[in-house]
Amino acid sequence: EVQLVESGGGLVQPGRSLRLSCAASGFAFDDYAMHWVRQAPGKGLEWVSGISWNGGTIRYVDSVQGRFTISRDKAKNSLYLQMNSLRPEDTALYYCAKGGPTGDLQEDWFDAWGQGTLVTVSS
Amino acid sequence: DIQMTQSPSSLSASVGDRVTITCRASQSISKYLNWYQQKPGKAPKVLIYAASSLQSGVPSRFSGSGSGTDFTLTISGLQPEDFATYYCQQSYSSLVLTFGGGTKVEIK
């Protein structure tokens, strides 16, 4: 059974940093792209960042480009999101999502999701 | 970036109704359109991928169609457990993956 368990969320002041983690199990982590998708309270879904199966392709939504860094560790079957210079508009539930069979970011879909970790940016 | 526009943003329907949700892309995305269902307090789950392929385990009352810029999700015979919010998402562009704004399906 595929399991994705996020951690690392919390309350942080504007301008500070936070690192999210996603522990993956139940599938061959190395074979799939992985993503972070967020949802602000009462709002819709927003894709934040994705990394291909081998880490060779990395993409970000414009609003986090230069502030967030996605990475993956195959030895630990884990996905990470380093978030710097946080802003109040980054407040959201952050989901880790597994990509589908292509292993890439394009022409693919999110076929498993974690339960999310809440990030609140406020002074 | 490719913009995804869903309509309607909400709808009321009864059990047994046929429901159609539309999603329009700001440019052609070929068949690379996916549909997700999200229930309150839960993570989304994929229903349809590549416009018309049914994800394993999803009931056959869900179907998807379309290509290019216009797509539809149809629920044939709405069930009580189908009341949720539905999102489309394009994966044509590898630069930015975008979701539609969502359609909330409520009980009439």
Image: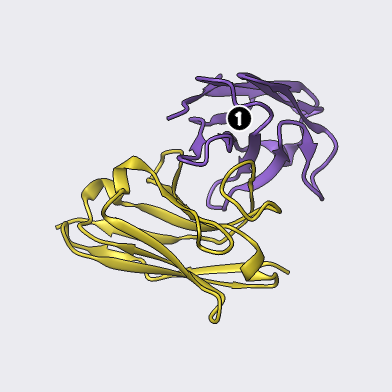
Looking at this view, name the residue that lies furthest to the front: A56
- Front residue of A71 and A57: A57
Pinpoint residue A11: horizontal percent, then vertical percent: 26, 64
* Residue A119, quarter of picture: bottom left
Image label count: 1
User: Which residue sits at x=29%, y=67%?
Assistant: A18
Would you name the residue on which mark 1 appears? B106
- Front residue of B102 and B95: B95
Residue A36 in sight: no
Tell me which amino acid carries mark 1: Glu
The answer to whether residue B57 is left or right of residue A117 is right
Pinpoint residue A45: horizontal percent, then vertical percent: 47, 42
User: Which residue sits at x=31%, y=48%?
Assistant: A64
Residue A107 in sight: yes
User: Which residue sits at x=56%, y=64%?
Assistant: A54
Quadrant in which the C terminus of chain A is drawn: bottom left
In the picture shown, does residue B86 fall above or below B21? Answer: below
In the picture shown, does residue A15 fall above or below A38? Answer: below
The answer to whether residue B58 is left or right of residue B86 is right
Q: Which chain is purple?
A: B
* Residue B22, quarter of picture: top right
Pinpoint residue B21: horizontal percent, then vertical percent: 65, 22
Chain where mark 1 sits: B
Pinpoint residue A104: horizontal percent, then vertical percent: 60, 52
User: Which residue sits at x=71%, y=21%?
Assistant: B66
Looking at this view, name the residue that lies furthest to the right: B60
Q: Indicate the secondary structure of the residue bearing disc 1.
A: strand
* Residue B49, quarter of picture: top right
Q: Residues within 10 Å of mark 1 (few under 14, many from 20)?
A: some
Visual hue assigned to chain A:
yellow
